Image (cartoon, helix red, strand yellow):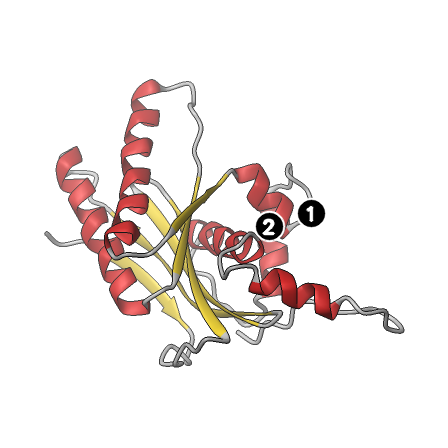
């Protein structure tokens, strides 16, 4: 089954991940487009590695589209070998049919990394925004602006991929690397003169 996948990756995609550097992947699920974003966490640094979108064909049956998602996400996991994954939670909307399809697509985002032996966490949209921006009711523009600050050299391949990177950043703060980022940030919060930059992402 063929699938369509848009990808942007850093020039350092061949970085060897060590015990000090942990790799996380975030997913923003959708039946038509599922965004994904990969970051490395090293101390208090967030390092952009890759991001993209897995597309499905609107002309195919639901079963075929779910297979496309399964294959596409599986390829992403195989290519980038994350240690841990996170998926954005979804809520019931006014259209039950759309909600059901979204739930099935979200199931693929949970299933694929789990089958690869990767632990998977789930976070609500408000929790993701609260972690990344500081407000659970932040708008998409605010999230996008904060991504530019946290991952200054990342070229983000669409809104869905950006949302997935936000999921990954949220995961980094909430045990995605067994609390390593949280502990590193606590060490960085020593009193210093002037402004202090906590995140020093280089990609």
Which residue is at 72% across, 69% downward? 187
Q: Secondary structure at mark 2?
A: helix
- Tell me where residue 120 appears, x and y as whole percent: 38, 49
The quadrant in which residue 173 appears is bottom right
Query: Disc 1 marks which residue?
Result: 134
Would you say 41 lies left or right of 68 here?
A: right
Q: Which mark is residue 142?
A: none
Return the residue found at the far left.
1
- Tell me where residue 65 appears, x and y as whole percent: 18, 41
Query: Disc 2 marks which residue?
Result: 143
Would you say 152 lies left or right of 73 here?
A: right
Q: Nearer the viewer, residue 170 or 100?
A: 170
Which residue is at 60% across, 48% downward? 141
Residue 150 shows in this picture: yes
Q: Is residue 42 above or below residue 180?
A: below
Q: Nearer the viewer, residue 60 or 174?
A: 174
- Tell me where residue 38 appears, x and y as whole percent: 42, 63
Of the image marks 2 and 1, the number of the one nearer the N terminus: 1
Q: Are marks 2 and 1 in contact (CB under 8 Å)?
A: no
The quadrant in which residue 97 appears is top left
Q: Residues within 10 Å of mark 1 (few under 14, many from 20)?
A: some
Would you say 169 lies left or right of 186 here?
A: left
């Amino acid at each position: 089954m063929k699938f369509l996948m848009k990808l942007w990756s850093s020039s350092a995609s061949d970085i060897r991940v060590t015990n000090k550097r942990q790799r996380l992947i975030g997913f923003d699920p959708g039946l038509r487009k599922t965004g994904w974003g990969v970051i490395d966490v090293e101390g208090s640094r967030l390092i952009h590695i890759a991001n993209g979108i897995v597309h499905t064909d609107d002309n195919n049956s639901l079963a075929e589209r779910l297979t496309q998602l399964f294959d596409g996400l599986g390829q992403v996991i195989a290519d980038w070998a994350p240690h841990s994954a996170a998926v954005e939670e979804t809520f019931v909307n006014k259209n039950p049919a759309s909600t059901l399809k979204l739930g099935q697509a979200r199931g693929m985002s949970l299933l694929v990394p789990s089958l690869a032996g990767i632990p998977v966490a789930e976070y609500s949209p408000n929790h993701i925004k609260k972690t990344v921006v500081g407000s659970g009711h932040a708008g998409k523009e605010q999230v996008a602006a904060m991504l530019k600050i946290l991952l200054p050299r990342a070229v983000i391949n669409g809104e869905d991929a950006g949302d997935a990177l936000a999921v990954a950043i949220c995961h980094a703060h909430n045990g995605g690397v067994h609390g390593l980022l949280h502990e590193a940030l606590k060490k960085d919060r020593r009193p210093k003169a002037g402004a202090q930059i906590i995140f020093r992402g280089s990609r």
